[in-house]
Amino acid sequence: MTNQDRRTPRAVRHGVALGASALGLLATTLSPTAHAASPAPATQASSASLPAASPVAWKPCSEGSAVQCGTIRVPLDWKESKDPAGRKIDVKVARVPARDQAHRVGALFFNPGGPGGQGATMLQYGAADTQFRGPLRERFDIVSLDPRGTGGSQALDCGPVLDPGQVVFPKGPREYEEMKRNSRARGERCLARHGDLVRNVDTVSVARDMDAFRAALGEQRINYLGVSYGTFLGATYAQLFPHRIRAMVLDGPVDHASGPARFLREEAAAMEGEFDRFVAWCAKDSACALHGEDAGAVYDRVVARADRTPIPAPGTKVAAVNGDWIRMALPEQLLRLRLLEDAMGVNAWVKLSERLAAADRHDDASGLVEGGSYVGNPDSPYTVVSCLDFPPQFTGYTDAAARLARARRAAPRTGAAAEAWIMSASCADWPVKATNPWQPTTVRGAPPILVAANTHDPATPLPGARRLARQISGSRLLVTDVNGHVSYYNSACARERETAYLISTKLPAQLTCRG
């Protein structure tokens, strides 16, 4: 759902994983608000239970920095928030004041995706200036938090999302059970190290933390921009606190009603389509390191060879890379985030072509290790939040095999190389019961919310965006005809319309963009 500079947390990701990627690529964090009371699940207490908040004691994040850092103190378990003796935790927050304070609109809560995107840490390292342009940077205080269990908010440390060498795509009941054992071992290690925190990092808890942050800022209503997984966080906040929203953009949407099987099937099909566009780009553009070759055939050849004999990865922490590692690197490496690519002077497709070329021509898969943040990456919050909010709900090996088969029918080349399967494999037998499993995010009583999606988003496909928009009363869907994850990052037209809406609260008259 969305992924970031390695100094800061992850993505589509989304993933903005679900992001960047997919849900996990580049992250954006925080909260919303609105009008009449909407029904909330029984696990989600009403806003009246929130305690009074103390103002944030802001200080520069570093000497001479314009970015301000602080902490808020929140209940570990919001269900026990009325207990004065209940355990509390600190959540890191950050603020970048609007440049034009005379025309300040308010605070813009930003969530960069994930699950687990560290918004406050990203702001500390300059994200406000690389990700926000023009009026947004001038007229809003950009604010975010590191969600509980990440970064400066008691980060979880439980091992990698997927262990190097572990079974990722089980070919029989024995391998399926091995995949489950890997998942359970990670979860038990997490519980042993962090205890009840592991049970309380779900998205509902973070949404409540966001509202505590709103109160600490003294804001009656907030503005929100969430990308990839951040759209789920925003929609959850809107469901809980509709009266506290002024304006909200949900870009690269996650439909929490999809369920794990449909999520995988749709994401696999979108990922294959994006890979086909990468292949077509390679055929046309000399910037591609595989220009003049069939990039798809090169990928097939590299993966097949790595399946037989892992390809060396010199200079990395692993000796060699197998085929599953290469497949699992694809969901992140294929994602385009043009605004961020321009800021960093990189092109994701150029890098992917170079990495595939090095593996094919020089027997060097080190770039595929560097570029893949799932296998071997110790991004514990990504796994823990995924298991609480996006559980695989397997009924057995037959069910898992059927999902993989459907993904391969939808995507004959890339198959289940999608963030949806990364989540399912990592959470195959998680020892903590999902606290916020798949269900609709119905929003009633909020001001009009703008949902934005791309026609070719491989991390959060367009069908899910359409479904989410129907769950939010009064929302409108802005569709941008472009490839890449998240409209804001890939389309100047979409950025302009989202910005105008956040300033004026008026939904755009034209709900389509071309590039």
Image: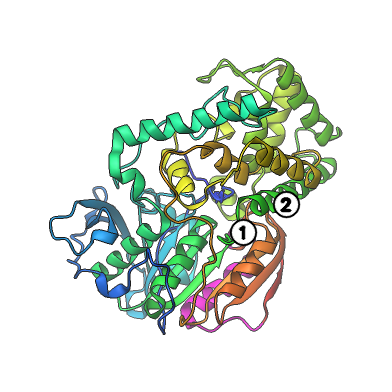
- Look at discs 1 and 2 and give the one toward the viewer: 1
Q: What's the residue at 26%, 53% (across, down)?
A: 76
Residue wearing tag 1: 258
- Separation of residues labelled 1 and 2 (CA atoms): 15 Å
The one nearer the camera, 87 or 469, is: 87
Instruction: Please say whether residue 491 is one of the residues in the magenta stretch.
Output: yes
> Which residue lies under the disc numbered 2?
270
Q: Position of residue 416 (x, y in %)?
A: 69, 40
Helix, strand or loop at label 1? It is loop
Majority SS type along the magenta span: helix
Query: Of residues 37 and 232, which is closer to you in this image?
Result: 37
Asked if residue 387 is positioned above or below residue 222 in the image, the reply reads: above
Q: Position of residue 159 (x, y in %)?
A: 42, 30
Which three-letter amino acid code belongs to the residue tagged 2?
Answer: Ala
Quarter location, residue 349: top right
Q: Is residue 390 left or right of residue 465?
A: left
Seen from the viewer's position, the closer of residues 343 and 446 is 446
Query: Which of the 4 image quadrants contains residue 291?
Result: top right
Mark 2 nearby-residue class (10 Å; few <14, some 14–19, many ≥20): many
Q: Looking at the image, which is closer to me, 32 or 68? A: 32
Magenta highlight range? 488-509
Q: Is residue 298 left or right of residue 219?
A: right
Residue 66 visible in the displayed image? no
Q: Residue at x 31, y 61 (%)?
A: 209
Q: Is 239 included in the stretch rendered in magenta? A: no
